[in-house]
Image (cartoon, grey):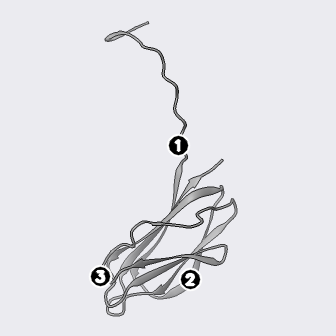
Amino acid sequence: SVGLRGPRGLQGVPGVPAPSLNPMTWTRGGTQFVGTERHKFYVDHPGTDMGLRATLTTPATGSDFIVELSQNGTVIQLATIPDGDDTSGYLTLSPGTVSAGDYFIVDVPQVGATFPGSGLTVTLWMRVTP
């Protein structure tokens, strides 16, 4: 058939679909405090290529702010937000794999000594695998 600007060409070879990037976000508003509250979240699908970022709305001062991430009860990553900064930056997790039914726990073992920081958001990413 003929398109608006002339004859249509042949269809190219379709690319490989990209795996979906699945973010899981945990938030705790207000002034922060040390806590092992054991906030759990479960995953329903296997995944790979995991990454983590911790962010504060208002930076902690006087010492670093630390977030601890555990997978199935084992600590796999500490995300450190440097004193006076607002993010840990993106951290690649190793080995970075998860199975359906695994769970994650977010704890805060250290806050700022002068000001603890406020408005914490922790995001965990993974590529869902079939």
Q: Helix, strand, or loop for circle 2?
A: strand
Q: Within 10 angstroms of label 2, few (less than 14), some, or many (20 or more) residues?
A: few
Above or below for 29 versus 43: below
Closer to us: 114 or 74: 74
| Amino acid type at mark 2 | Glu
SS class, disc 3: loop
Q: Kindly check if marks 1 and 3 are in contact, taking CB atoms under 8 A apart as contact.
A: no
Whether 75 is drawn above or below 41: the answer is below
**Sequence-first tag of 1 and 3:** 1
At 52% across and 33% down in the image, what residue appears? Answer: 15
Rendered location of residue 98, percent (x, y): 64, 62
In the picture, the disc for residue 18 is 1
- The residue lying at 33 percent from left, 84 percent from top is 83
Residue annotated with mark 2: 37
Res 54 → quadrant: bottom left
The crowd level at tag 3 (other Cα within 10 Å; few <14, some 14-19, many 20+) is some
Q: Are marks 3 and 2 in contact (CB under 8 Å)?
A: no
Check disc 3 and report the residue beneath it: 84
Estimate the spatial distance between the alpha carbons at disc 1 and disc 2, rounded to whole Å: 36 Å
